[in-house]
Amino acid sequence: MASAAGCLGLGSDGAANAAPDDPGADDGASDDGPDGGSADEPDDGDLGTRHGIEFDRVLDAVDDLGLDPSGNDPVNDRLEDALSDGTLVRFPQGEYSFDGVVEIDADRVGVLGDGDARFVLPAGYTRLLFNYDPVPDDVLIENVDVDVRPDDTTTGIRLRCRNHFHIQDVEFLGRGTSESDGGTPSAFALAVNDEDGRGVLRDAVAKKGSRIDGYKGGNGRIGVWVGWSNKGTVRIEGCDFREFGNNGVYGSRTPGNVEIVDCYFLNNNATSARISGAGSYVENCTIEIDLSRYTGGAVDASDEFNTRAVVVEQGVQREGAPPLPAGAEIRDCTIRARSSPLSQSVVEQSPVARSLVVRDTEIRCDIDGTPAVRRGPVGALPYRPDRRRPPPPHWTELRNVTVDGDAAGGVAVDLRLAPGSAVIDCDIDCPGRDRDGVFLDHSPRSAVSGSEIRTDGHPIVVDADLTTPLDDHLLCLGVETVLERFGDDGSGVDLTAAVPFLRTLGRTAGTERICLGLGPAVPSLPDAESVSNSLRISVDALDGDVPIGRVLYRP
């Protein structure tokens, strides 16, 4: 993995869409994380049932088990022995020292902090804190802080349950950067084996995840890893993840579903949220890229560095596994990309992604040359032979999306090899110098309707494959679409009258749209049969239902 472009696929206060006021602070229990309340609350006052898990007994860690709340004597061995089937261990306020992993091999077990319960790891500890062995069911971890502030210390929680787990109100204190065998432990590694199973991670916080430049060839620290063993649904709700070097949430290489809801993300390398296909989505999240707010010191962006907000890909880990169904969605999100040494895009539809819907979302991009939304050219990734070209569909649909910001150059919405794409009821405002609005590269049967696109560059650019069938439209425009080019000198022409190789395929009052297609003169162009030769046009305005633009390139 030679570079970021190659290796990476080239908390709020009450509400998840309000950024916390104290980025990076982690010296106490979080009081500014997202409030992820839901109907999945404790069922009775004596803790016999909590978050749908029925316990036979509740033991006090100090009074019943004799664990040391002063942090002097390690507690992990006695805790592991106590976690038999149906046991919940309640930790009174205090510091509890761990010098080894707690292996969970029983069903219906849990640990619950009562007040400020802090689990402290010794300097140099790099193994897991909690681990499954073998696969249990109904595991609860709630209301504890995990302290990794001692030197060279990193840890994480790994749960793979048959049907259900629940993790809530867990905060990592400190920056986890130290490696163990196999890489730096993820904060959480989660899976549910049963297709109908469901695991929940709620209100987890890690404000100094690792180092943002710590990708380490894919072995850097991840906020949440949901991998191949997950066949059910993992829901990540109300969480706050910042400054991870290898994805905030890595949930694209799983045959199950990943729901990312009401979360806050800031300054995560590779991406903050990575998902795959149908059943997986990012909803009502705030995601920010702003390296001026990074708390980890100087950043080395020379290698394996690429800050993105959301990545969609068809992540396949096992040879011969069927492709995951298309249908990933991003909805009701606020995404801001303000500063970064390198961002391939803000929202990235990877070359190995299928379809993507983005709706009811605001995206701001102030990073020059960086697309707010990008559909990467479809194809296999050469450095990962298991990451093959995904089957169709490959389209992108933006619906009621706002795109703005001060970025100069490049294009706001960059869609390549994405036939059948659509930009519907969107507002795209790009005042940055020489920045285009929507680029459709070899993406026939695409449409722009009900939208307003205002740019310093060209509002729409179409790059057409000259082998496109003559009855296949290159672009359909709703006649109500507003296109404006700042400072336009008015030198554009009627594309369907003055350009001999374009024609109108559909202009009817019933459809209220005009579709552009290739004209009969195209086959006579030199090398028209070559896919590498294309016709590039801009659409800069609509005069009634007449598209006005320019020919930017032709063979």
Image (spheres, rainbow, N blue to C red):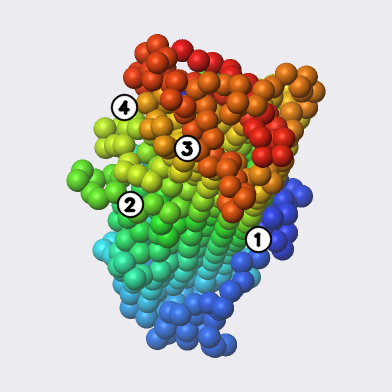
Look at 40% across and 64% down and name the residue there: 233
Tag of residue 324: 2
Q: Is residue 427 left or right of residue 307?
A: right
Identity, as a three-letter code, of the amino acid under mark 3: His
The residue to which callout 4 is attached is: 382
Q: Helix or strand or loop: what does disc 2 sit on?
A: loop
Give the labeled residue for mark 1: 34
Q: Amino acid at mark 4?
A: Pro
Q: Which mark is residue 11?
A: none
Q: Nearer the viewer, mark 2 or mark 1?
A: 2
Depth check, front residue: 501 or 17: 501
**Counting other residues with Cα less than 10 Å from the Cα at mark 4, is it few (<14), some (14-19), or many (20 or more)?**
few
* Residue 287 in sight from this viewpoint: no
Please provide percent x and percent y for residue 464. Answer: 47, 27
Quadrant housing the N terminus: top left
Mark 3 or mark 1, earlier in chain: 1
The amino acid type, in three-letter code, at marker 1 is Pro
Task: Indicate which disc, 2 or 4, sits on the residue closer to the N terminus.
Answer: 2
C-alpha span from label 2 to label 4:
20 Å
Vertical placement of 529 versus 246: above or below? above
Could you tell me how far apart the alpha carbons at marks 1 and 4 are, in whole angstroms? 39 Å
Task: State the SS at label 1.
Answer: loop
Task: Provide residue 115's location: percent of width, then percent of height.
Answer: 63, 70
Dot 3 lies on which element?
loop
User: Of the residues shown, which amino acid type is indicated by label 2?
Assistant: Leu
Mark 1, other Cα within 10 Å: few <14 / some 14–19 / many ≥20: many
Residue in the picture at 46% in, 69% down? 166
Q: CA distance from mark 3 to mark 4?
A: 32 Å
Label located before the other in sequence (1 or 4): 1
